[in-house]
Image (cartoon, rainbow, N blue to C red):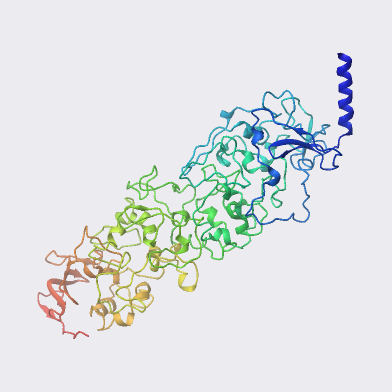
Amino acid sequence: MKRSILVLALLARVASAAAPASTELEPRGQAWTVSAPATPAPAAPAQVAPAAGDRRAVAPPFEAAKHPSAPAATVPPGLPSTSQGVRGSKHDFSKTGPGPIKAVSESDTCKFCHISHRAGAGVLGNRPDSHPTSYQRYRSSTMESTSGAPPPATRMCLSCHDGTIAVGQTRADRLAMRATGDSRPGGFAKTSIGTDLRRTHPVAVRALPGMKLRAPPPGAAARLSAGGQVECTSCHDPHREDRDPVQHKFLVASNRQSALCLDCHTLDGWLSNPSAHRSSTRPPGSINGSATGYGTVGDNACASCHKQHGADERGRLLAGGQISDDKLCLGCHDGRVARVDIAREVVKPGAHAAAPGDSGHDAAESPSGRVRLPEVIATARRHATCVDCHNPHAAYSRSAQPALVAGALDGVWGIDRNGLRVDKARQEYEVCFKCHGDSANQPQARGPQPPETLRRALTDVNLRRAFDLSAPSSHPVEGPGRNLDVPSLIAPLTAASTITCSDCHSSDTTPSGGARGPHGSVYPHLLERNLSTLDRTPESPQVYALCYKCHSRDVLLSDRSAFQLHRKHVVDQSAPCTACHASHGVTVQQGTATNNAHLVNFDVSIVHASSQGLLQYTTRGARSGSCALSCHGKDHAGSSDYGVATSALRVRVPGSHRAVAAPPRPRK
C-alpha cells in the first residue's frame, strides 16, 4: 500500500511539473475550471465541480458579465493588460507577482485564497476566518434596509483587506512573504478597508419593495448572493482585474457613467432629466479624492461625490475628511470644475452656508422624522447646506416655469402652503418654507441683529402665513396679490403676476450674469440688490435698488403713483421704504385688511405712537386712507387723511396744537 501511494505521489509531481506555469482557478458559468491561458493545454481544461453548499456554485458567469449600458473602454497607454486572470494582477502574491507583497518561494497564485482539500465541508477558502461581530456595520439615517454581519464570502475578502491578517497566513500553511513595508494589505492605505465598515459600501443588505434599490435585472453585471444579499463579489471579480480597464479595481464590469452602480440603485431624475452630474463633460481631475481615471464628471458619475470604500463614517458613502457639510460640493463648484464659483458666494456677509464641522443637517430630516424640519424647538440649531435646496442626483439646467421649479431645485422635498410635506417641490417657495415657514427657531423672531435696527410692529416671521392667499396683504408669491392698482410695476409685470423668493433674495452677482439663487450676497438678508432700512438716508436709485427693480422710480415718486405722497416721505423726509412697508407681507394671525393693506407694517424704531397713543394705518378704499402715528417729530392724528376722502394730509406742526392742511392734489 505504501509503495502504491509513493508511486501516485511521484506521478502527481511529474504531472505538476509538466503543467503550464500559469495554471489558475477561474469561473466559467456555474462551475470552477482550471485553465492555462498562457500556453493552451492540448486537452480541454479539467472541470472542478463545486462542493455541495458552496456559495460559489451560484457565482456569476464573470466572462459574460459585460454591462449592456457601459460604453466600451480601452486600456490606457502604459497600463499592462491582465486579461489572463489572477497571474500578473494585484492579487498575484506568488514569488513572481508584480506588487510590493509577494511570496519568497511559493509559485502557486491560487493557494493564497483557495485550497482543494482540508478546508472543510463545502468550503474552498484558504483564508483564516474573522469573527463577524468584530466589524462595525454600515449605518445611515437614510438607509432603507439593514446591514447585517459580513457573510462568509465577504469575510474571505476581509481576511486580507481589513488589515488584521497577513497575506501569507492561510488556513493550511504559513507562507513566507517578502514585502515593502507591512505584509498585510491593510498596511497599504489604498487597499485597507479596516474593521470599521461604516466607511465602506454596506454588505448583507437586501432590496425590499418600495426602496430606491432593486435586485439587479437579468443580464446585469452585478449579482446578489444566493440569499439575495450584497457581497463583495456583487461588484468585484477577484480573478480579473481589468474588466473595467480604466480603474483596474477587479470590478465585474466597466463602471463608466456608474453603470454598475445603477444595476441596484434607482435615482429619480438621474437618467430622465438627466442630472447635470451625469451629463457634465467637465474634467473632474482629482476633485474630492476621486481617482477613477475617467476623464469627465459624467463618466465619473457617482464617484464624483461618493466612495465605495474609505467614505465619511457618518454615512451615505460621501467622500470623507470634509471640514463642513458643503465642502464636498464646493470642491467642484468653485469655478475650477463647475463654471460658476459658488464657493466665493457663500463666504459673503449674507449667505446660505454650512458652518465649519457638522452643521446639524441630516438627509433624513422631515416634519415627522427623528430629526425635525421645520424645527419645533426655539433653541434648535439652524443650518443651511447645499443639499437642503439641491438634489445632486436630479439637478439640471432648466428655467423655472409655472408650477414647476427651476431644474436646479428639481427633486427636492418641500413644505406646501398648507404646511404639509411634498416629496417633490413644484414651487420655489415650497423649498424655502422648509426653514422660513413654521420653524420655531427663526432668528428674526428675536428682534434685529446689530447693526440692523428695523423692528416691526407686527412680528410674525412665518413666511408661509405671510404669503398665504388669505393674508391681509403680501407680495404675490403663492398667488396674485389683492391690489389691482399698482401703476408703478415695470413690464412685463402686471397686477396679475406672481414672483419668486429668488427675485429678491439672490446672489448680488446675478444681475451681471453670475451665480443665480440665494447663495451669498454683499447685501444684508441675502438680497440681490441694495435696500437701505436706515432712517434719514438720502434717496437715490442705488439706495432702494431692490424696490426699483420691479417698481418704476419715476412713477413712484410722481403723482402717477397710487400713493401720491411717496415723494414727500422718501425724498423730502428721507424715510426708507421699510419705515412703512414690510417686504413679505402681514399674516392674518396678526393683521387685518383694514389696517395692513399695501404691506403696511411700521418699523417702530422710526415710527412711534401718536400723542393719543395710536400707531395705526386705516385704508378707506381706493387710493384713500389715514394714519395715526408720530414720525420724525410730526404727529399724525387719526383724522389725518389722504386721497379721495379729503385729498389732504393733515399734519401737526411741531410745538403747536394747530393742524395745517396741505393743498389737495388731483388724482390721475
Determine the residue located farthest toward the top in the rendered image.
1
- Is the residue 357 above or below the residue 623 in the image? above
Q: Quadrant of residue 522?
A: bottom left
Q: Position of residue 395 (x, y in %)?
A: 49, 59
Q: Quadrant of residue 481?
A: bottom left
Q: Nearer the viewer, residue 509 or 632?
A: 509
- Residue shown at 45% from the left, 45% from the top: 210
- Residue shown at 51% from the left, 41% from the top: 207
Residue 119 appears left or right of 652: right
Quarter placement of the C terminus: bottom left
Q: Position of residue 536 (x, y in %)?
A: 30, 72
Residue 350 appears left or right of 36: left
Q: Position of residue 28 (x, y in %)?
A: 72, 40
Residue 515 can be seen, yes or no = yes
Q: Nearer the viewer, residue 309 or 29?
A: 29
Residue 247 appears left or right of 88: left
Q: Position of residue 108 (x, y in %)?
A: 80, 33
Q: Nearer the viewer, residue 657 or 408?
A: 408
Quarter placement of the N terminus: top right
